[in-house]
Image (tube, grey):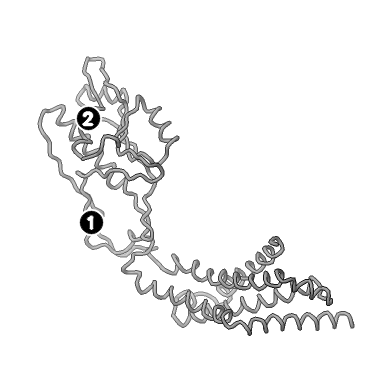
């Protein structure tokens, strides 16, 4: 009994030592106190300004007067991964003669479209067949905006007066952070490519100069379900980020003991490894509990629905267990790093 009593007495003194060291560092105390308040305040500010920013899903917000997209305009590509890009690719890059003797040259059509749409010639590339085109897409992804593909059966249809062809496009969404992403290729590039080629072929076959002007727009709609919600978009990042900030602060304290060999000196005086981990874990447990209760308190003060519509135990454990998990990772980093 005497050995256990002295063990726990020494452990309690070490725990008190940790709190005294924290008490002497007012900057650390301010960070622990202000972190929950600041992240909650910034989240509250984002709610106030969300109507203007649109969040990560602006397409779900109310739209009264939707923007019109002019399909007569074919956007040029923008180099992202490589220093070059291609607005239009096409197949085939040689003239084709059908069984009834008609000759078709896709390259001439595409170059005419490029000239009409002010597309530089270095942004146009041709391939002998669709296999070569697809192999190029695989080898050099995200450098080609769209492609016209004419197969043999398309030329047979054209010889009979029927317009058929295929438009391939890059389906990678364009990121417009922080306002989300937009499928611009499907909404503008593909319709514009189809309109340009159809108008040219109609003019080619009929001899009548065509001037087709089309625009598209989405339907006006009210605010949709699952629309922009700052608690969903920013809440986890900010709330759980406060724990990460505190963990970094506390990790410095453990590293300080290790760097200046204070742990070795305390070991020489009889401290055990178990006492070291127990005291620091209890210290972290108290700090994480304080941070959890602070987040809940400030969230309730700022009247976030999540703290009124859910059970206290649910969101308390969600926050507290996350902080406890980070504490375990901190001990792991402390043991790995020298």
Q: Quadrant of residue 190?
A: top left
Q: Quadrant of residue 201?
A: top left
Return the x and y of residue 294 as percentages of the image width and height. 54, 80
Question: Residue 218's mark?
Answer: none
In front of the other: 226 or 77: 77
The residue lying at 33 percent from left, 66 percent from top is 53
Q: Which residue is mark 2?
A: 109
Q: Tag 2's secondary structure?
A: helix
Q: Would you place residue 127 above or below residue 58 in this image?
A: above
Between the residue at mark 2 and the residue at mark 1, the CA separation in whole angstroms equals: 31 Å
Q: Nearer the viewer, residue 300 or 32?
A: 32
Q: Residue at x 15, y 27 (%)?
A: 205
Marking on residue 67: 1
Q: Element under label 1?
A: loop
Residue 270 lies, in percent from the top left, at 84, 76
Label 2 or label 1, whichever lies nearer to me, is 2
- Left-right relation of 79 to 217: right
Q: Is 235 above or below relative to 126?
A: below
Q: Quadrant of the C terminus?
A: bottom right
x and y percentages locating residue 2 in the rendered image: 89, 83
Q: Residues within 10 Å of mark 2 (few under 14, many from 20)?
A: some
Which quadrant: the N terminus?
A: bottom right
The residue nearer to you, when weighing 290 against 25, is 25
Decide if residue 56 is on the left or right side of residue 323. Answer: left
């Amino acid at each position: 009994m005497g050995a256990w009593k002295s063990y726990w007495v020494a452990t309690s003194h070490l725990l008190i030592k940790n709190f005294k060291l924290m008490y002497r560092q007012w900057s650390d105390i301010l960070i622990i106190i202000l972190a929950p308040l600041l992240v909650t305040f910034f989240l509250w500010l984002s709610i106030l300004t969300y109507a203007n920013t649109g969040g990560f899903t602006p397409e779900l917000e109310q739209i009264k007067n939707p923007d019109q997209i002019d399909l007569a305009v074919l956007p040029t590509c923008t180099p992202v991964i490589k220093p070059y890009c291609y607005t239009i690719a096409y197949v085939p890059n040689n003239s084709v003669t059908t069984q009834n003797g008609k000759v078709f040259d896709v390259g001439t059509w595409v170059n005419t479209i490029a000239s009409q749409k002010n597309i530089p010639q270095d942004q146009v590339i041709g391939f002998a067949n669709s296999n070569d085109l697809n192999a190029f897409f695989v080898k050099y992804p995200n450098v080609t905006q769209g492609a016209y593909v004419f197969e043999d059966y398309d030329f047979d249809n054209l010889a009979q007066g029927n317009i058929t062809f295929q438009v391939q496009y890059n389906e990678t969404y364009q990121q417009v952070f922080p306002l989300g992403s937009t499928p611009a290729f499907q909404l503008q590039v593909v319709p514009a490519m189809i309109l340009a080629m159809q108008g040219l072929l109609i003019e080619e076959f009929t001899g009548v100069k065509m001037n087709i002007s089309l625009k598209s727009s989405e339907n006006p709609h009210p605010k949709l379900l699952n629309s922009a919600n700052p608690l969903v978009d920013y809440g986890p990042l900010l709330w759980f980020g406060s724990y990460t900030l505190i963990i970094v602060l506390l990790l410095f304290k453990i590293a300080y003991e290790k760097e200046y060999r204070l742990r070795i000196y305390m070991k020489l005086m009889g401290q055990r490894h178990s006492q070291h981990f127990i005291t620091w874990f209890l210290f972290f447990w108290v700090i994480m509990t304080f941070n959890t209760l602070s987040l809940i308190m400030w969230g309730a003060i700022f009247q976030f629905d999540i703290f009124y519509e859910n059970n206290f135990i649910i969101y308390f454990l969600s926050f507290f267990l996350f902080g406890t998990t980070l504490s375990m990772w901190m001990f792991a980093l402390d043991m790995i790093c020298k």
